[in-house]
Every structure is written in C-alpha cells, then in structure tokens.
Amino acid sequence: MGVSSHASMFAPPASRADGRRNLIGLDRVELAAELGTLGLPAFRARQVWHWLYHRGATSFEVMTTLAKPVREQLAEHFFIDRPEVTRDLKSSDGTAKWLLRMADGQQFETVHIPEEDRGTLCVSSQVGCTLTCRFCHTGTQRLVRNLEPSEIVGQVMHARDRLGEWPAPKDGRMLSNIVMMGMGEPLYNYDNVAKALKIVMDGEGIAISKRRITLSTSGVVPMMRRCGEELNVNLAVSLHAVTDELRDRIVPLNRKYPIAELLDACRTYPGINNARRITFEYVMLKGVNDSLADAKELVRLLDGIPSKINLIPFNPWPGAPFERSTDAAIRKFGDYVNNAGYASPVRTPRGEDIMAACGQLKSDSVKQRASDRLAEEAAARAAVALAVAEKEAALSL
C-alpha cells in the first residue's frame, strides 16, 4: 500500500458533531483563517497562538490579553483539547508512561524519559502499527488509525502540563528532546506528523529545535527525502539486520524497500554530514543478529554513510519469540563496530518495569482474542526459527 492510500484508509475521525473546532493542531495560517471567519483581526491569532503554545492555556478564560467578549466568542466556536489520561505509570528509574485516550475512545501510549538536567519524550504517530516487526510489541497490535496533528502535538503539551513547564524554562528543561519513536510508523502518517512537528518547532511557541527532534523510520524510502527537505530533523533508521533474508522476516517492510535501496536513501538524506549523522537502530537478538560476522557486515554496509549505531538490548514482552543477547555478545559486537570508527552506544533499557522500554509499547485500544494472539506468537516463533536455521546454513557454507 502506498503512503497516500495508507493515509486515506487510516485517516483520523471527522470533527466534533457540535461543529466546534479544536484549535490545537492548526498551523498559523489555519488559525488566522478560523479566527478571521469571526471577523477577528490577524493580531488576535498571534495572541491566541502565544497563549496556546507558549503559555499552555487550556481554556479561553485565562487569555487575559483578549477582551472578555472575544473570549466568549472563541469559546462559542472553538475548544482547546488535550488527550485524556487513562493510565499514569511511573517506573523505578523515573520513566513515566501515559496511556492517552482521544475523543473517539481510541488509546495510545507516550513515554517521558528523564535525565539529570533534561528529558526526552517518546511520541506516538499512530494507534497500533501496520509494520508487524517481529521483535516489537506494538507490531502485534493491528493499526487502528493515524493520529491527527492535535493528538501528536497534544502529547507534547500533556507532558509540559505534567512537568510544569509553561512557559518553558530557558535552561534545564525536563522536556528538551523529542523522538518520534512511539507507536506507529511516522512516515506512513507524514502529513500529520510534519504539521505537528512544525508547530512544536515554532520559535514563538513550544520552541523545541529541529536539532533536538529525531524521527525514526523502519524504512519508508519514498518519504525519507521529503522528510529531510521539509523538516530537516534528525533521522533514525530501524535496521536490525544485515541481510535481506533476515530483515525480510523480522522487519517485513524490507520486502518492499530492501536494504540496498534503504541505504541509498540514507546516503542522500538532506543535511547529512559528519556533524549530523544518521542513527541506525539495531536491536540485539540472541543468536539471530548478534554475531561478529553480523558486526563486520554492518560496518561494510554503512561505509560512506555518516552514522552512529545505537545498539538496543532486546526488551522482552509477553509471548515474545526472542531473547536478549548476552552482555558479552553485545560488548563484542559494539567493540568491533566502535573500533571500525562508528560510535556504537548501548541503549540502557528504561522503564522496563512498566513496559515503557523500546519496543514494548502497546495500548489497550484493541482487545485481541487469545486464539489470535497465540497463533501470531506461534507464527513469529516459527519465522525466527527458520531465519536462524537459514543463517546457520549460510555460515556453514
């Protein structure tokens, strides 16, 4: 399925029945146009933008730079919405995971990962996912729909609410970075993601720099250049395998856009240089992709691409068909890659005790029948066993 047909099939629901429109998620031009229908001048749109995205207003009543009749007029025609929090979990390491519900009842997860003087928000772009990567819990949840711009921006605004960062402090922000690495494939919902990120990057609002935003893709090749040209954010690529045979099985999108085509798109990603490298994500799966031979092939494949390799110890989930690579295997793999000139940090799992670590997100939006779940788990285990057998056979030649 192409990107445009995918966007159409999994589009967000229509506007509210009462005709009022949510102002969150509108860009500057749209906001001015909406307020213009009420006869309000352009400067009112700038004021409302400031209140929404710099001050974090959740009602028109607090917008005290607007006259009371104007506020009443706005409330009659518009509303300001955030996703509703239905579950709030806190890990022993400080990681927070929120299950958020939209107006149509669908739910998705967002994760905040704090550091000493900064913090990263892992943002979702879809309810569920269409890619069915074998190592990812989200991939076991069928795609329900795309998130609209208000729901993507709403995750950032919700986190700011919880962290008390309205207006954002100039230094020591606890929401300093954004990674589009939550539920879903961002490039299959590109228009909505791009619109939301442009709002997030606006210097007179939320004002998170494009240098602090990373978009992760499993390899939707046709959209990668457009992403670089229009957004110029950092790019992360979920690679996870060094042969098409294995990647076909654990990242099924590879059958459509194989490794060579994906890496060609990486080499021509706009703005890539030694100071701004592509991050290749590589989940470490015991006995599957973690050998020294895999490390050597990875280095060969990435030759000429300014890049770093993020090694991710596999984070287990119920019914997962994989095991985490041993510490020794990860260290040996990482040492080889690092000695070849590629930074290869090992991502420390965060939030494992609340199922908030990489690859563990899955909402309660869709209740899967036990028989379907068991069938999927059996199929995944069979696919992995076959991939391992094929790899062993190839190595014996």
Image (cartoon, rainbow, N blue to C red):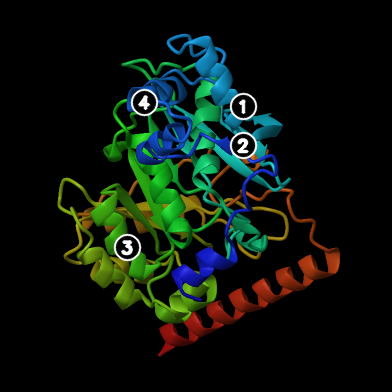
Q: Measuring from the top left, give residue 103's x and y in whole percent.
A: 69, 41
Q: Earlier in the sequence, mark 1 or mark 4?
A: 4
Q: Is residue 27 above or below residue 125?
A: above
- The amino acid type of the residue labelled 3 equals Met
Tell me how far mark 4 sits from mark 2, CA to CA: 20 Å
Q: Is residue 18 left or right of residue 393?
A: right
User: Is residue 35 positioned above or below 65 on the image?
Assistant: below
Judge depth for marks 3 and 4 and give the one in front: 4
Q: Earlier in the sequence, mark 3 or mark 4?
A: 4
Which residue in the structure is indicated by mark 3?
224
Distance (Cα) linking label 1 and label 4: 18 Å
- State left or right for residue 379 relative to residue 149: right
Looking at the rendered structure, the secondary structure element under dot 1 is helix
- Amino acid type shown at disc 4: Pro
Q: Earlier in the sequence, mark 3 or mark 1?
A: 1
| Residue position marked by numbered label 1 in the rendering | 76
Residue located 27% across and 39% down the image:
211
Frontmost of labels 4 and 2 is 4
Cα separation between marks 1 and 2: 8 Å
Question: Which residue in the protein does label 2 denote?
Answer: 20
Q: Position of residue 98 (x, y in %)?
A: 63, 35
Q: Tell me residue 165's x, y (percent).
A: 46, 18
Residue under label 4: 41
Q: Quadrant of residue 40?
A: top left
Mark before the other along the chain sequence, 1 or 2: 2
- What residue is shown at x 32% (from left), y 62% (from top)? 224
Mark 4 touches mark 2? (CB < 8 Å): no
How many numbered discs sit on the rendered protein?
4
**Amino acid type, label 2:** Arg
